[in-house]
Amino acid sequence: MKKLPVIISIILLLLLAATATAATNSTSTSAQDAASLVYVSSVKIDPEEFYPYEVGTVTVTLTNGGTSSVGLSDPDIMHEKIHILNKDSWSTTSYIGSGSTITYSFLVTVDPPDGTFFPLFSVGTVGSGSIHYPLIIKVDSADIKASISQKPDAFAVSTKDTVNLSIINPRDASIQNIIVTPSGQGVDISPSQKYISSLNGQSSVEVPFSVTPGQQTSINFHISYQNGDNDHATDVVLPIIIGENKKAAIPIVNNVELVSSGTSYTLTGDVNNAGLTDAKSMIVTVGAPAKAVEPYAQYAIGSLAADDFSSFEITFSSNNLSSVPLLITWKDKDGNSFSTTKNLNLRTNAASGTTDTESGSSGSSSGSGTPVTTGSSAARNSGGFSGGPQGGGSIFGFGGSRGGGISSFYPVIAAGIIIVAGIVIWLKRKWIAAKLKKR
């Protein structure tokens, strides 16, 4: 009978041990089940593509999809090329409740070489194993490319021209906060600064500037930008070479004719634009010692396209017709003013002492090209040109008719019509004679 209490005690001890083991296993299983419902819900990497050694941020957010709280500890990013700068920020265990989220932000640097790395995010759980999630981090050392994509062959003093700066992003990811700041001595540049919020990877942008030089100089375009929170910069230098604008409008005067009109004279002719750009607001008049008088003191041609021509008619008075200065003014598409003076030598009817000038907002400079003035002359019976004609008549052309263009061919056309009419009458003479006899 003494053995029975001992046996009962052993059985009770075994039951207590089995109960404790079952409780422990139940708790462990419950912790594992709860941890299995915690997952990585989002990952953000800034910048999207790192330069070697620059600082960026990797942000990982976890969500608890279960009904029990889960303890998390020791978050880490595991890769030999990636270094965490704020690893001590999570030295204690953090609990994430049911339906809640927790976010870990890592400040990291990435070692070269260029390429794509696949680090592993890891965080431990209380009462269970660890949660792992693969990441992708890209490294590229390529800088942006910048160059002058459009500029004139040569700049003219005080004349506004357009310069385009091309910025190319050869990287796979975008760059932000691009600021272009031009600077230079003796040159006006507009705008003084240009801002571009973002430039996508594998794309480019054209940035136009208006440049008005006052002297031969150079312009430095300073380009700053950000990759994430990291600052980068590059420069482009544009030499400003003063010279002849090969695309400028070049007025050529042709078919000049002078006609007496009482106390004044009428000068007619054609202006041809032999340049490569259009001339705007073109006006033709005469300069001293000649004096422009009404009704045609100034002749407004308006816009004259490249490789086009227009006739003009000017009335003036003068005591000396050996040379008449013909003044032509115009503007380009940017509003720059130009002028040229053609000294028409009426003795030989050829250009003499031609002077071209162009003026901008703050000065003047030598113009481009030397225009040529041509025409035809007929000798006067009285001889010479210094005194001018006394009374009506024409110095050049036929009978005082308007010179320039088709008008100079009117006599030839009239003669041709008379000849054709004579031939027709001759061929139809018998028919005409028969008609006359019937009458």
Image: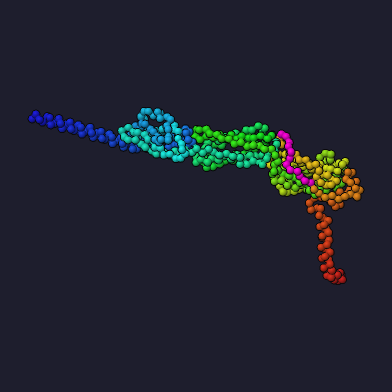
- State the scheme by which the image is colored: rainbow
Q: Is residue 411 left or right of residue 274?
A: right
Most frequent secondary structure within the magenta stretch: loop
Residue name at image x 51 percent, y 40 percent: 171
Residue sitting at the far left? 1
Q: Is residue 382 left or right of residue 142?
A: right
Image quarter of residue 99: top left
Q: Nearer the viewer, residue 211 or 195?
A: 211
Q: Is residue 369 magenta?
A: yes
Residue sitting at the far right? 382
Residue 107: image x %, image y %? Answer: 44, 32
- Asked whether the viewer can see residue 174, the reply is no
Residue 2: image x %, image y %? Answer: 9, 29
Total label count?
0
Q: Nearer the viewer, residue 137 or 45?
A: 137
Q: Nearer the viewer, residue 245 or 427?
A: 245
Residue 151: image x %, image y %? Answer: 64, 41
Q: Is residue 184 magenta?
A: no
Image quarter of residue 297: top right
Q: Is residue 71 left or right of residue 177?
A: left
Image quarter of residue 210: top right
**Residues in magenta, as a range:** 362-373
Above or below, comparing residue 211 to residue 251 in the picture: above
Q: Quadrant of the N terminus?
A: top left
Residue name at image x 42 percent, y 35 percent: 81
Residue 34: image x %, image y %? Answer: 32, 36
Residue name at image x 73 percent, y 40 percent: 367
Residue name at image x 83 percent, y 47 percent: 349
